[in-house]
Image (cartoon, grey):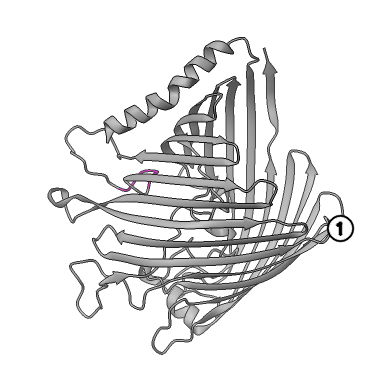
Amino acid sequence: MRHILFLLTIASLMPVTVAAQEDSTKVNEFTVSLQSVNRGEIRTGGYQVEDDDDAMDGRSRFVLGVHRLGVGYRRQALEAKVTAEYADTWGGSSGGKLTVREAWAQLTARNGLFAKIGRQLLSYDDQRIIGSDDWEMMGIKHDALKLGYEGHNHQAHLILCYNQTTDNMFNGNTFYKNGSASYKAMQTVWYHYDVPRVPLGASVLFMNVGMQGGENVSEKHDEWQQLLGTYVKYSPEHWTVEGSYYRQFGRNEDGVKIKAWMASIKAGFDPTPIYGFTAGYDYLSGDKYFAVPTKGMVGMVRHNVIRGFNPVYGTHHKFYGAMDFFYVSTYFNGFTPGLQNAYIGGHVSPLKGLDLNLTAHYLAMGTKLDDMDRTLGHEIELGASYQIMKDVKVTLAYSFMNGTESMNKLKRSSGDGYLRWAWLELVISPRLFFTKW
């Protein structure tokens, strides 16, 4: 594997070296940018209650903040960026978390080949499977080598990742999942094609993800799971139609077979720049029983096959309801009966810089469980955003969910079925310094 990576890297960078020598007199650019995001939330219920039935009575109020300082450099054939990130809850006792959000360098050849290495954000298609997920404040980042080609309506990317918790020389090949990465290794191939003179684009995505398996150090081994699927977008005048289909297979970290799938369809109609409408449907397969480790537990059913689809590294907040009940927070004991999400919404911009939106969701299990209604609830989302100036934006939103008895059983949520959430967010993102020479 190391030899293959070395050869791929050398092959991609050879044309870049020539291009850099030929264009050494081109303009250099240096940029310093700042982003400050502060979000206050008021939430009643929603997350699971396991030990104390009164633990979530009343409303939770808190303010989250994340602040990023980025430095970027660019010239012909070379680009680099480093971004420091600090996130905390206002008044938090943990001291917050200071980390590196991005630290990468990219070399690009004239023929469209490029190589990008380091900590980077990955975002593909509609971000359902791989996205940066800025809503989670710290977002999703990857330490990766990305090789690719872009040109003539074609885009092809190869992403290679390998993670270890530390460079401990005495720990062998063991990976402990307590760092920034949730996987030990990942190889991803993504290809996208835009049809000439037709507003149609299609992508194919394949992922091979390695997780650490085994009960102890002597039994540690790698388990591999795969994801394969496609995404299509068609955008004729005033319309946007998107569809996707993905399958998961292989084995999870406990060695249990995976056979899961998902499909989605979405249509948008914008007759004018002032207003528009959206409707769609998502289906994610699920399990009929609680998942149990391979050694089993007394009185519980052990899976022979896991059928609950996992949308891995996507921006889940964008798709399955703004209250984040699904795929952001887990079901009780990590069980997933899948999900059906049917939604309809609209948006309007009555004033320059002001956007208003309304979305309604019908949410149900993907799998029929014994003695339980499939319906989980109905969620209503209201939102308003205003661009105060080019680098300052404020957003206000309110969500309400009428959950069913099935929702209460699976999520162990408080709120007697009536769950509410409101938030106010201010984003300030100025460019502090910029120069050319």
Is 401 in front, or is 294?
294
Write down the residue under mark 1: 350
- The answer to whether any part of residue 204 appears in the image is yes
Q: Position of residue 295 (x, y in %)?
A: 17, 67
Where does the N terminus fall, quadrant-wise? top left
Q: Residue at x 33, y 28 (%)?
A: 7
Most foreground residue, 247 or 29 = 247
The amino acid pointed to by label 1 is Pro
Q: Is residue 13 magenta?
A: no
Q: Name the side, left or right, on which 381 lies relative to 403.
A: right
Q: Give the quarter of the image for residue 324.
A: bottom right
The 10 Å Cα crowd at callout 1, few under 14, some 14 to 19, many 20 or more, is: few
Q: Is residue 428 above or below residue 431?
A: below
The residue closer to the viewer here, 116 or 321, is 116
Dot 1 falls on a residue whose secondary structure is loop
Place of residue 156 in the rendered image (x, y in percent of width and height, measured from the top left): 49, 41
Q: How many marks?
A: 1
Q: Is residue 110 above or below residue 157?
A: above
Residue 254, above or below 338:
above
Residue 50 is at least partly visible in this image: no
Quadrant where the C terminus sits is top right
In the image, what residue occupies the spot 68% across and 44% down? 427
- Horizontal and vertical percent for residue 364? 52, 78
**Does 386 sit left or right of 258 as displayed?**
right
Instruction: Report the predominant secondary structure element of the magenta stretch.
Output: loop
* Residue in the picture at 28% in, 32% down: 2
Q: Residue at x 53, y 38 (%)?
A: 86
Magenta segment: 177-181
Q: Position of residue 371 (x, y in %)?
A: 41, 90
In the displayed structure image, the side of residue 31 where residue 223 appears, left or right: left
